C-alpha cells in the first residue's frame, strides 16, 4: 500500500463512518463498481482505531464523565442501546454477509436512510422541549439500539438511523446526536475486537508501517470533521440535506446496476 492509497482510504472511512451515508454501503459500491480491493484486516482495524480516537476527542467531556462515573445513567442507556445491535449481528450474521454481496441491497438501504433522515427531522420534537439524558427511557434506548442493529445492513447509515430514532423518540436534537456518537464507541470497539482476531495471522510488515499510520491519522482527522459537520447540521435541523444524496445514489444504483 502506498501513501496515496492510505490517505484516500482514511478519508473515505472517516467521512462515511459518521456522515449519514453508510460506510458499509460505500464499501460495497467501491468494491463492485470501482474494483476496489480491501487492504486487509490489519489496516481496517487501524482505520477503526482512528475513527474511535475521533469520537473520544470530540466528546471527551462525556467520555471523561463516564470514566469518573461508570454507573451513571448515560452508561446504562448506552448498554441498553448496544444490546439489540449485538443480538441482531450475532443471530442474523449469515444474512448480513450475503447483503454485502448485493448492490441492490445497498441501493434500497440508501433510499431507506434518506427517508429515515427526512422523517426523523420533520417529525422529531423541537429541541426546546426534547428529552435529555434523565428523561430518556429504557424504551427510547432500546428503540435507538434496534435501529442501530438494522444499520448493519449495507446502505443503511448507523449514525443517520440512530440520530433519526432519537429524534422520533423526542430526544433533544443535540443529545440525540451525542448519544448516537457515544453509542458508536462500543460498536466500533466490538468490530475492532472481532476483526483483530485475525491480526496475528496477517500482521504488519515493517516496510508498510508508515502508510498504515498515515491512513489511521487521516481517518481520525476526517472522522472528527464529519462529526462536527453532523453536529452542526443536527442543531440547525438540516441533517435531511443528506437525504437527497442518499436517494440520488440509491436510485442510480437500482436503475443502472443489479446484483
Image: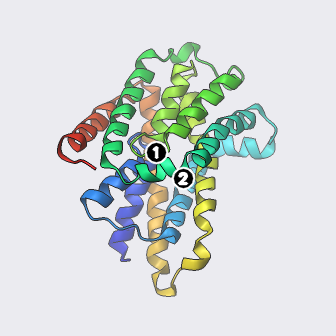
* Above-or-below relation of 143 to 195: above
Can residue 173 be seen in this snapshot? no
In three-dimensional space, the C-alpha distance between marks 2 and 1, rounded to whole angstroms, equals 10 Å
Residue at x-position 51% and y-position 38%: 150
SS for callout 2:
helix
Q: Nearer the viewer, mark 2 or mark 1?
A: 1
- Residue 24 position in % (x across, y down): 42, 50
Find disc 2 in the rendering and name its residue: 54
Residue 160 lies in quadrant? top left
The colour scheme applied to this rendered structure is rainbow
* Above-or-below relation of 147 to 173: below
Going from N to C along the chain, the mark reached first, 2 or 1, is 1
Q: Which mark is residue 18?
A: 1
Query: Left or right of 7: which side holds 41?
Result: right
Pointers 2 and 1 in contact (C-beta within 8 Å): yes
Q: Residues within 10 Å of mark 1 (few under 14, many from 20)?
A: many
Residue 241 lies in quadrant? top left
Asked whether 192 or 235 is in front, the reply is 192
Q: Residues within 10 Å of mark 2 (few under 14, many from 20)?
A: many
- Residue 185 position in % (x across, y down): 61, 48
Amino acid at each position: 500500500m502506498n501513501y496515496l492509497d492510505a490517505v484516500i482510504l482514511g478519508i473515505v472511512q472517516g467521512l462515511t463512518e459518521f456522515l449519514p451515508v453508510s460506510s458499509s454501503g460505500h464499501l460495497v459500491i467501491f468494491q463492485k463498481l470501482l474494483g476496489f480491493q480491501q487492504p486487509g484486516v490489519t489496516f481496517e482495524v487501524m482505520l477503526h482505531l482512528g475513527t474511535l480516537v475521533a469520537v473520544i476527542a470530540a466528546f471527551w467531556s462525556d467520555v471523561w464523565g463516564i470514566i469518573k462515573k461508570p454507573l451513571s445513567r448515560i452508561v446504562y442507556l448506552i448498554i441498553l442501546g448496544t444490546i439489540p445491535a449485538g443480538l441482531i449481528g450475532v443471530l442474523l450474521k449469515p444474512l448480513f454477509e450475503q447483503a454485502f454481496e448485493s448492490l441492490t441491497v445497498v441501493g434500497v438501504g440508501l433510499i431507506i436512510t434518506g427517508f429515515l433522515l427526512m422523517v426523523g427531522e420533520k417529525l422529531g420534537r423541537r429541541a426546546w422541549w426534547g428529552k435529555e439524558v434523565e428523561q430518556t427511557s429504557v424504551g427510547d434506548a432500546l428503540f435507538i439500539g434496534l435501529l442501530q442493529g438494522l444499520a448493519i445492513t449495507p446502505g443503511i447509515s448507523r449514525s443517520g438511523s440512530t440520530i433519526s430514532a432519537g429524534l422520533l423518540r423526542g430526544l433533544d436534537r443535540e443529545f440525540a446526536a451525542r448519544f448516537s456518537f457515544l453509542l458508536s464507541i462500543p460498536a466500533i470497539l466490538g468490530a475492532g475486537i472481532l476483526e483483530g482476531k485475525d491480526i496475528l495471522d496477517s500482521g504488519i510488515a515493517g516496510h508498510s508501517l508508515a502508510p498504515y499510520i498515515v491512513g489511521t491519522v487521516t481517518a481520525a482527522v476526517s472522522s472528527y470533521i464529519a462529526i462536527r459537520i453532523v453536529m452542526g447540521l443536527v442543531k440547525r435541523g438540516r441533517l435531511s440535506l443528506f437525504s437527497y444524496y442518499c436517494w440520488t445514489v440509491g436510485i442510480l444504483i437500482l436503475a443502472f446496476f443489479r446484483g
